[in-house]
Amino acid sequence: MSPDLSTRAAGASELMDDPGADRAMLEKTYRRFRLVNAAVSRPGLIYRRDIRPRARTGRIRVLDVGSGGGDLCRLLAASLSRDGLVADITALDADDRATRWAAAHDGGAGVRYRSALTTDLVREGEKYDVIVSNHLLHHLNGTELQALLADSRRLVDEDGLVLHQDIERSRAAYLLFAAATWPFARNLLAGSFIRDDGLTSIRRSYTAAELAAAAPPGWTVRRGVPSRLELRWDDADARP
């Protein structure tokens, strides 16, 4: 039986966010993110649809907010390099445990890892062609969400794109994730926070209607599969 999903469990906490979380479990979680994100976040689609077309005009600057173990950044770096395209990719995470682990496992991708906030980058005058995030929005309360979106607008360059992706809360999403991860709970995902925190993440996530209501004018909410939300700012689309 799934929990009550009629409203966001905004006060729920994920185990890996605990400053005292077991280090070995935390690091195994970072390693397993690559597999989970490949299955549910469709990073190849993001690359083909949103990154590669913008990279053909020269060096592309990409910012990943809440980058965690850095798997999305490394995938983008590898894809761009394979296609002979040049990029500056910054992986930003407020948790220095994630930043340190990601930097130590860069594997020659050449990603720049920073433990900081988007407000720090705004203050420094940084600009990017594409800003992305994955599974970040559900961690934020209403004030933090508005701050992220405002910072994203300040950080994205003219004709740039902001793409915040997350889970859509639903009973189907909860049951599907529970069923899909159950066979791996005692082997592939054992000793990590993936299963428990994934279920908590779904409880904390927005529905499409909730996210659309929270987003300022100019932002677009799109739905995808499996149970995906995409909060998008495209400067060209937002012009009157």
Image: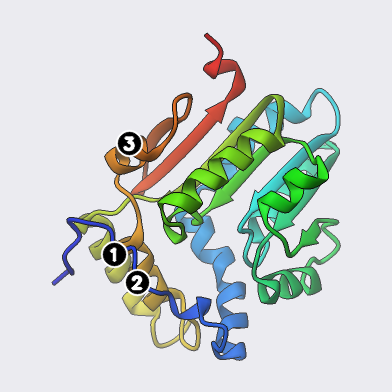
Give me the disc on residue 12.
2
Q: Residue at x 79, y 26 (%)?
A: 56
Give, as a three-letter code, the residue at label 1.
Ala
Q: Is residue 169 above or below residue 163?
A: below
CB of mark 3 within 8 Å of CB of mark 2?
no
- Quarter of the image for residue 35 reads bottom right
Q: Nearer the viewer, residue 46 or 118?
A: 118
Question: x%, y% of residue 119?
Answer: 68, 50
- Quarter of the image for residue 132 reads top right
Disc 1 on helix, strand or loop?
A: loop
Q: Classify mark 1: residues with Cα within 10 Å, few (<14), some (14-19) or many (20+).
A: some
CB of mark 1 within 8 Å of CB of mark 3?
no
- Residue matched to label 3: 213
Q: Is residue 158 above or below residue 200?
A: above
Question: x%, y% of residue 87?
Answer: 82, 41
- Residue matched to label 1: 9
CB of mark 2 within 8 Å of CB of mark 1?
yes
Label 3, label 2: how far apart the Cα atoms are: 22 Å
